[in-house]
Image (spheres, grey):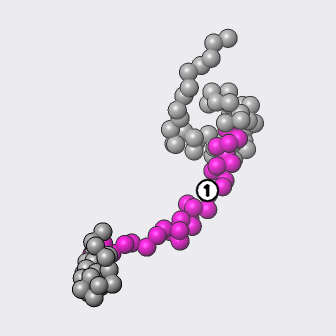
Amino acid sequence: MARRPRRNHSPAFKAKVALAAVRGEKTLAELAQQFDVHPNQITQWRAQLLESAASVFGATSEAAPPPVDVKALHAKIGELTLENDFLESALTKAGLLGAKR
């Protein structure tokens, strides 16, 4: 028997199959035959749906990093660069710093 080429299913299709499995109106074998997908794949999609169901109701908003103020970061970089240049020149004049790197 020849192997079937690998198929990529859309997220909408996966959700549809997983929801049908969660409902429990049909057995896995019936769903596998209806959607032409292996029963193990349906079980995996169902488990993924149940694991990530909490994120639908806003659990991911807590994990989102705060927005970065790029302007403030650039200002801080400029300030530190100026400070480093000043200290380097002062140490060089005092003879405490050798040749420039």
Within the image, what quadrant is residue 5 found in? top right
Main structural element of the magenta stretch: helix, strand or loop?
A: helix
Name the residue located 64 percent from the left edge and 43 percent from the top edge. Answer: 45
Residue 82, percent across and down? Answer: 24, 81
* Residue at which label 1 appears: 52
**Residue nearest the observer in this picture, 75 or 66:** 75
Q: Residue at x 27, y 82 (%)?
A: 92
Q: Position of residue 67 (x, y in %)?
A: 39, 72
Q: Label 1 crowding class (10 Å Cα cut-off): few <14, some 14-19, many 20+?
A: few
The x and y percentages for residue 2 are 63, 12
Of 32 and 91, which appears nearest the observer? 91
> In the rendered image, which quarter is residue 35 located in?
top right
**Viewer-closest of 25 and 66:** 66
Q: Where is residue 34 shown, x and y percent of the image?
A: 64, 29
Q: Tell me what residue is drawn at x 28 percent, y 88 percent.
A: 94
Instruction: Say what secondary structure mark 1 lies in.
Output: loop
